[in-house]
Image (spheres, grey):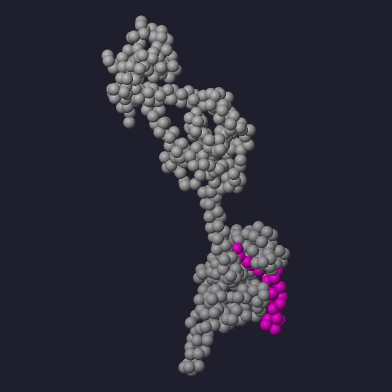
Amino acid sequence: MRDEQLLEAVERYLAGEMNPDERRAFEQLRTENAEVDTRVIEHQQFVGLLKQYGERVELEKRLNAIHDEIDVHALVEEVTERPSWIIQLWRNHHSKISVAASIAIFAILATLFVTGKMDNKSTYTELSLTLQNQRRDISRLDHKLDNALKHEPRVLPPNKSSATGFALTSNGLIATAYHVIYRADSVYVQNVAGRVFKTKVIYTDAKRDVAILKISDTTFTGLGTIPYTFKRTESDLAESVYTYGYPQDSPMYNDGRVTSLNGMNGDTIDYQVSVPINAGSSGAPLLDSRGNIVGLVKAKETGLEGTHFALKSDYLLEAIDNIPTDSLTRKPVLSTKNTLTNLSRVQQVKKLQNYVFMVKVY
Amino acid sequence: MNKELKTSAPTDSEIVFGILNNSESAIKRLYVAYFPMVLQLIINNSGTPDDAKDIYQEAIIVLYNKIKKGDFELNSKLKTFLYSVCRRLWLKRLSQMNRYGGDLHDFQDHLPVEDDVEEQGERDIQFGKMQGALGMLGEPCKTIIEDFYIHNRSMQEICESFGYTNADNAKTQKYKCLQRLKKLFFQQK
């Protein structure tokens, strides 16, 4: 119990409750006994800490009470730095914006690439292979060179370049595209049965890309009545049209609609049609659903599938009128009776096959 | 970028003398005057309003103790001192959370206040221990200790409120409680 009494003495001493005698005696004890002295200091410090702790708790309570009276929410609104809306937009959505931008750039590049705007090439391709013409030129030069060197005749290899033509009259006038027969040595036509006739080019119009051939073969006996007529008026937009031609060895049918009454770059002599057309279809007839010839297939736009051009039939008729009279025995007589009108498409095409030819160029 | 906040601040000497005289309103006016400044600092440097409250109260206590101890020199402004302490404390907090990006967006001038903050930190550790020890002490010891040593109530009052038959019993009880508290306090690491 000594310790408890000592503590009480220390407390009384520190609180200043001792009378002068007691105090003197205790101070005496403190100087004599180091242990007592340590206890006094220790106790003083500990109680001091306890008091300070109490004060701190009290102070914190007061501060909290003050804090509770402040409208923190309103202050937050006031002091938050508001960057301009564009920076906020960027901060909140920068990942989305980046993705969108890359997609946009990609889309633009892809579109440019697909539409062919990226390269400086012409967007206009003639459907018969122009390259073939170049090859033909080269082989002709080759041939001449060979002849000059060897003095031996040499047979030209048959040229595979093919296109389409269709009959205008029963006596063997055939329309095709000018670029098909351009620079050709000789032009032959082959009918559906595989018979080949030699022809003579009697009229060309490079500007409109139209040429008229005449079968000059002696074995040719005539075609019989032409079943279709030529439309003299312009077709309507969205009119259903079809072609029949020889993009390959066997005939091919394709249909679509008139998508524009103007051709490439607003050219008024052509229609634009949405008929899928392949190289080799050049010179094929373009017919409407009643079996009228409305045009002559010419070309397509490079890179943009499904857009093709056909010469309007009235320009074709104009070409027929312009055939020099000296190359004809008599004025061409065009059919005036359309026997396809009331037939189904299948029947129309079946009848058509005798009047559409594969044009072979050497 | 820095927008200064407009506050109708009380003069520094008003506050210092108010605190020295234990004026309740002085603390309140001080607190209200500079809280927005600290809130601005904290929430624009990846903190929350609650962080701002913690930091600000700690800084107020640092200032309060400094004034009470009599070593606050009026040559530095209260506002600048508070801002500097909060800034220091927040930097410390941010680096503890590993969220300090190396750049603090400042709104005010600031002073070096490392010593004050360190001193406060040490005392906070002691207080933390004391709080822990008192928490573990249990009743009725906790109340007896708090009443006697913190609230300065006399043994006579304590004796009555706890219904001890005589003061000696109460004293013995208080002695035992204090011994236990000391043991608990020094046991804590």
Say which of A241 and B3 sits in front.
B3
Q: Quadrant of residue A77?
A: top right
Q: Nearer the viewer, residue A349 or A121?
A: A121
Q: Quadrant of the N terminus of chain A?
A: top left
The percent position of residue A160, horizontal first and vertical second, equals: 50, 76
Instruction: Give how far across and how far down residue B58 sits, in percent.
Output: 48, 32
Location of the C terminus of chain A by quadrant is bottom right
Q: Where B164 falls versus A36 (above or below)?
A: above
Q: Nearer the viewer, residue A304 or A90?
A: A90
What is the x, y in percent for residue B153? 43, 14
- Left or right? Give the position of A74 relative to B127: right
x 66%, y 69%: residue: A311
Residue located 43% across and 19% down the image: B150
Q: Tell me which segment is drawn in magenta.
A: A307-333
Viewed as shown, does residue A89 lie left or right of B129? right
Residue name at image x 36 percent, y 16 percent:
A23
Residue A290 at least partly seen:
no
Number of numbered markers: 0
The single residue placed furthest to the left in the displayed view is A1
| Residue B163 part of the magenta segment | no
- In the picture, measured across the screen, residue A9 lies left or right of residue B48, that is left
